[in-house]
Image (cartoon, rainbow, N blue to C red):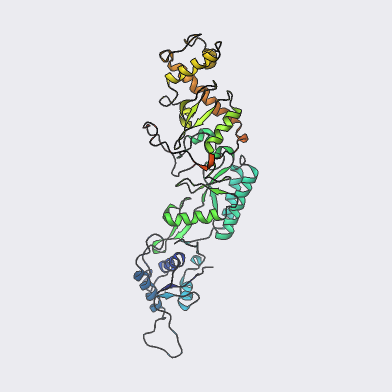
Amino acid sequence: MISLGDSVGGNTGTSPHDQALVLAMLSVIRNKAGMPYYSGDPVLKPGPKDHWQLAIETFQRDAGLLPTKPEPGRLSEPRGVVTKGGATWNLMVEHMPPDFREVRMLEGARVAYFPMPRWKLDKNLNLFRVASRNLFGHFAENVVRLFRDFYDKTGISLKLEEDGSWRPFELQRYMNSDSGPGETIHHYGYAVDLGFDELQFLGKHGLKITADSGLAALGSQNKEKFFQARNQLARELHATTKSGDLYHLQAYDDDPLDSVSSFMKLMETIGPRKMRWTPRFRKPTDYLCDLGLGGEKYYVGTALDIWTRDRAYRISKEDLARALSERRKKEPSFSADAFLGIKGSGLPASGEIAPAQIKETHLVAVQALLKEEFLGAEAKWARWEPVNYPDGKRRIDNTRKLPRRPSRPKFGPRLVR
């Protein structure tokens, strides 16, 4: 049932949600001419205080709560004030259409919304169970508990976003994300993206508006209040500290977790050639790798570069020549042909290799070897383990550390991990 937490109007310390509720109700209630008492936007632009207090006074006057002459034994309502349980409030509730009397408020948010039917929660839970088959059991159970707890408290059903559960490496290349293939814990069964399933709320002129799953129609402050309310009930789940990604919840605290180094550890453990990796910067992360040769590590691009075998960002001819030559110094019998998987590669069978002798086919072969390490990690993703940043210090962003890179297309309306 619709309820007011505290008085609205006058000199009272009106809470945002109580004020918004009164204005939303006055947007629905019509006068004798069929016009709403309040014509502003109760959600995004409440307008000056004197405007909405005038709307309250007008309703009070039409309802006979502001007599022009004092009447013995009758106390009139405070002018321009709606008190909890007072005559103005009771008459406002009485004048609300029956199907609008169930609107609810979320503390701190200027949104009068409608609770959702129970079947919607059941539908979204069933969809989540189908999509969560690759999530780890205890993590999936915590997400199910969040679905239920949040509905019980707010009457709102969460929903699993498309591609918001376990995710194959290939799909990550199409996501609107700084994380490349292998770098998000969505790949390892410990993350979900949860939004809201068609939340309806009262907008300008008392119209019912249906918000998208990210609640963009509510405005940034209101939207964040709803996600914060979700997160407060997400026991044993952690929201990401990544700016703009409100959907994301995961099993690990995002501040200390180094998801990239966790991925590197997995590749070094189960990769076909046990290559050694060092992530350098962030956004996007770029890598140094020893190519499985046991020597120095060389720049090989970002995860997306490696996965797509990008021709612009990969190991250089100079670095590949040096890597092969250094291995040959330690092991004279080392075969570059066998390493690259190219019979008759054209590289000398002994001695030092010069950069001029490195051809396009050799670089392409190295990219194939690097991707095999990624594919090996993906095949055994369940062996992933979390690795934290050393001393809790994140790597710095690479925006000013790498050459300007050609822009890549971003897919999807939401920022995701």
Say if residue 101 shows up in the picture. yes
User: Where is residue 37 drawn, in percent x and y?
Assistant: 38, 70
Q: Is residue 210 visible?
A: no
Closer-to-camera residue (275/41): 275
Query: In this orientation, which residue lies closer to the viewer: 223 or 242?
Result: 242
Q: Is residue 358 above or below residue 285?
A: above
Q: Residue furthest bottom?
A: 72
Q: Residue at x 43, y 17 (%)?
A: 360
The quarter of the displayed image where residue 315 is located: top left
Residue 248 rendering spot, x and y as whole percentages: 52, 46
Seen from this angle, which residue lies furthest right?
137
Is residue 273 shown left or right of residue 355?
Answer: right
Q: Nearer the viewer, residue 105 or 385?
A: 385
- Name the residue located 59 percent from the left edge and 59 percent from the top edge: 152
Q: How many marks?
A: 0
Q: Answer with the quarter of the image where residue 77 lies.
A: bottom left
Task: Examine the rendered structure and indicate whether residue 339 appears above or below residue 201.
Answer: above
Q: Residue 273 is drawn in which quadrant?
A: top right
Residue 1 in the image: state x and y as whole percent: 54, 68
Residue 181 in the image, given as x and y percentages of width and height? 51, 33
